[in-house]
Image (cartoon, helix red, strand yellow):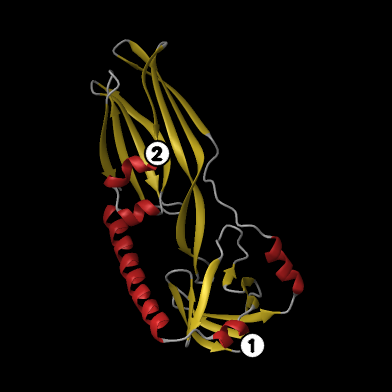
Amino acid sequence: MKIGCRLLFSVVWVMAAFIGCQQHANNGKLPESKEAKQLLQGVWSDVESESVVFQIHGDSVYYPDSTSMPAYFRVYNDTLYIGSSSRYHIEKHSEHVLWFKGGDGEIVKLVKENDTQEEELFEKQKTQILTLSDVMKNDTVVAYQNNRYHLYIAVNPTKYKVTRHTINDDGLDVENVYYDNIIHLSIFQGARQLFSRDFRKQLYQKRLPSRFFDQAILNNMEFTSIDDKGFHMNVSVCTPGDACCYLIEHVISFDGKLSTETLEY
């Protein structure tokens, strides 16, 4: 999985760089199509399913999924640009018809709705920021060489935002925003505290690929074992909604010292 994660983010980085160069070239040489932009204003639905795909209002694209962030858009020649790095080749475009090639290579066929109720839904909708977990607490009692230890782990959501790009069901690159977590660990022997610390994602920044780190959250911490080195704890850093994770092992010695090793998967 380590190789898969690296390959995935390398491909994404190359594609984003290429699109950025192309986009810069278009912005520098070609005027934006004001007429096409005006024709795109309104609510657009899928021809077959009749489900709403997005609304275009002013300079922005709004999605019916309340977890997807609005994105800035523009049109150059026969290309629709959405957000900072996504572009879609327009196959057909008129006042009420829009066909373009989605991010998955399939042709997206849309028709403009004239339903004012659909527009009102977008006006009332606010983008939701996702929290993957409520406050999670875990108390563990372990014994080693006739001594008993109490481990307290708490996973606490924060207001620190992490943005992740995904391809939705309509083949569009959308941004979802998540709240990151802080994990607290305390270790006691009876009433004596051996260790206490808050763990943040930034602690692992130098150990993880930068493109993975930017879209990942601190997911969880688990006790795995105890031996003469101390308490072995595994921390997972994951991209939300994906199986791509990195596992970091911490060993806390009996005198409260912390050591770290990255276990990649």
| Label 1 with label 2: CB-CB less than 8 Å | no
Q: Quadrant of residue 258?
A: top left
Q: Position of residue 5 (x, y in %)?
A: 32, 56
Using the image, determine if residue 112 lies above or below residue 208: below
Residue type of the residue flagged with mark 2: Arg
Identify which residue, 157 or 141, lies in the foreground: 157
Q: Tally the numbered discs.
A: 2
Gap in angstroms between the C-alphas marked 1 and 2: 50 Å
- Amino acid, disc 1: Glu
In this view, 34 is above or below 195:
below
Q: Which mark is residue 34?
A: none
Residue 263 in the image: above or below residue 254: below
Query: Which residue appears at 56% of the width and 51% of the height?
Result: 129
Residue at 36% in and 43% down: 202
Residue 29 lies left or right of residue 71; in this view the side is left
Tell me where residue 262 sits by quadrant: top left
Asked if one can make out residue 26 in the rendered structure from this viewpoint, the answer is: yes
The residue tagged 2 is 200
Q: Earlier in the sequence, mark 1 or mark 2?
A: 1
Which element type, helix, strand or loop, lies under badge 1? loop
Q: Which mark is residue 95?
A: 1
Residue with the most extreme left position: 228
| Percent of width and height locating residue 62 | 60, 67
Residue 51 position by quadrant: bottom right
Q: Residue at x 51, y 78 (%)?
A: 74
Can residue 244 be seen in the rendering of this structure? no
39 or 108, which lies in front? 39
